[in-house]
Image: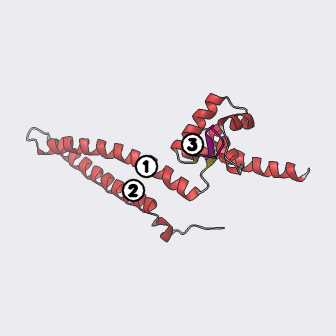
Amino acid sequence: MNGKEQLDQARERVIETMAQNMNLYGVTDSIGRLYGMLYFHDEPMTLDDMKEELGMSKTSMSTSVRHLLELKMVEKVWKKGIRKDLYKVEEDWYQSFTDYFNIKWRYGIARNILAIEKSMTELNKLVASEDTDEEVRAEAKADLMKLQNALNYYDWIERFIDCLESGKIFEIVPRKEH
């Protein structure tokens, strides 16, 4: 095996593993392969370049790139003299992780808090009503305590996200540079 074949084999091993693990980011293997391929390209690529390299349809490639853009794992770049859109991988994996984590968790937290607050309003009405059976009132009070604990947890997660967004996390767990 010559040097170029060894290089390609080493890269392919990493790309394949990235593809298999991209489900952690909620993406398919094919999007993971695209990300891995872009990671090893030193120059930004057009959709046509990517299509040719991976053998995927242009529509599929466009959808995959759009998904990676939304996750902030790739970025669109400009290069003088080239009119087609160019894309390159976001090389700061720390930033990619924090962006992804923040986007997904803030969305999930907001939905959960909204549901909890609506339920707490209803449960408080049950507890306050004179028409509520004592057993139901006791269960409603227990549920209110559980939901308050959930809100406390979401408050903690939001503060953790703030720590990621501000970069304070790196004071606690420093980045490892080259």
Residue lying furthest right: 1
CB atoms at circles 2 and 3 under 8 Å apart? no
Position of 69 compared to 34: left or right? left
**Residue that label 2 marks:** 157
Q: Which residue has dot 1 on it?
A: 105
Q: What secondary structure is marked by label 3?
A: helix
Report the amino acid beneath label 1: Trp
Q: Position of residue 76 (x, y in %)?
A: 58, 44
Q: Range of the magenta residues?
A: 76-87
Label number found at residue 68: 3
Q: Marks 1 and 3, how far apart in space?
A: 17 Å
Element under label 1?
Answer: helix
Residue at mark 2 to residue at mark 3: CA–CA distance: 24 Å
Q: Amino acid at mark 3?
A: Leu
Q: Residue furthest left?
A: 130
Callout 2 touching callout 1 (CB < 8 Å): yes
Identify the mark nearer the N-term, 1 or 3.
Answer: 3
Give the vertical position of 155 relative to 85 (above or below): below
